[in-house]
Image (cartoon, rainbow, N blue to C red):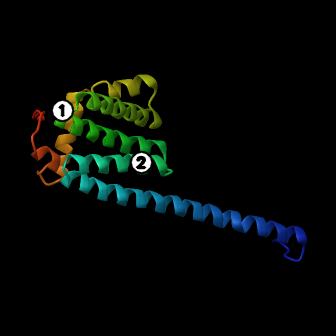
Amino acid sequence: MINFKSSVGFSLCLVTIPLILGCHSKEERESRNLAELRKKTEGLYELYLSGDYKQAKDNLDRIVELNQITEQPLNDRAHALFFTYARMYALERTVGNDNLAEAELVKSRYWALLEAESGGHNDTEAGEYVKPMTGDFIFNFIVQWDERASGGRGPNYMKGPVVARPERQ
C-alpha cells in the first residue's frame, strides 16, 4: 500500500496515474481515428461508385490521402491502398489512360505485396500472393467487387463511353 503522506509515494502516484490514463486515452483515440477513417472512406467509396470519371478519381485520391495521413497498422493501410490503387487502375484502364493505368497497377501490386509481408508472409509467399495479380485479374476483380457493392449497378463512370469491359469468369 502506498503511503500518500510520503513524498515518494505521492510522486509515484502523480507519475503512474497519468501514464495509465494516457495509455487508455491513446488507445481510445487510435480506435476513434480508425473508426473515423473507415466512416470517411466508406462515404468516399459511395461517391466514387456514383460519380463520373473526375468525381471517382477525386474520391479515390482523397482515400489515398486519408490513408497516408492516418496512423494505423501497416497491414490495414496496405489493404486499403491495394484496393484504392486497384480501383484507380480499373478507372484509368476504362477511360483508356493506358500509361496512368499501368502506374496504378504497379502501385496496387506494391501495396498487395506489403499487405502480405506485414501479415507475416515471407518473401516467397508474398511473391506467390502477388504473382497472379495481372492487369486483367485486378480489373475483373474490382469491377465485380464494385458491382456487388452497388447492388449490381457498378461504378457510374463505367456507364459512359467505355474502352475496356471486364471479362466474365
Quarter of the image for the N terminus: give it.
Answer: bottom right
Q: Give the class, few, some or many, for how many residues have Cα within 10 Å of label 1's Cα (few <14, many ≥20).
A: some
- Image spot of residue 121 (x, y percent): 44, 31
Question: Residue drawn 52% across and 58% down?
Answer: 30
The reply, left or right, for residue 118 in relation to residue 10 is left
132 in relation to 163, above or below: above
- Image spot of residue 78 (x, y percent): 41, 40
Mark 1, residue position: 96
Tag 2: amino acid: Glu
Give the CA separation, mark 2 to mark 1. Answer: 24 Å
Quick one: label 2 or label 1, which is nearer the N terminus? 2
What SS does tag 1 mark? loop
Question: Residue drawn 62% across and 61% down?
Answer: 23
Tag 1: amino acid: Gly
Most foreground residue, 98 or 6 = 98
Question: Residue drawn 10% across and 45% down?
Answer: 160
Q: Are marks 2 and 1 in contact (CB under 8 Å)?
A: no
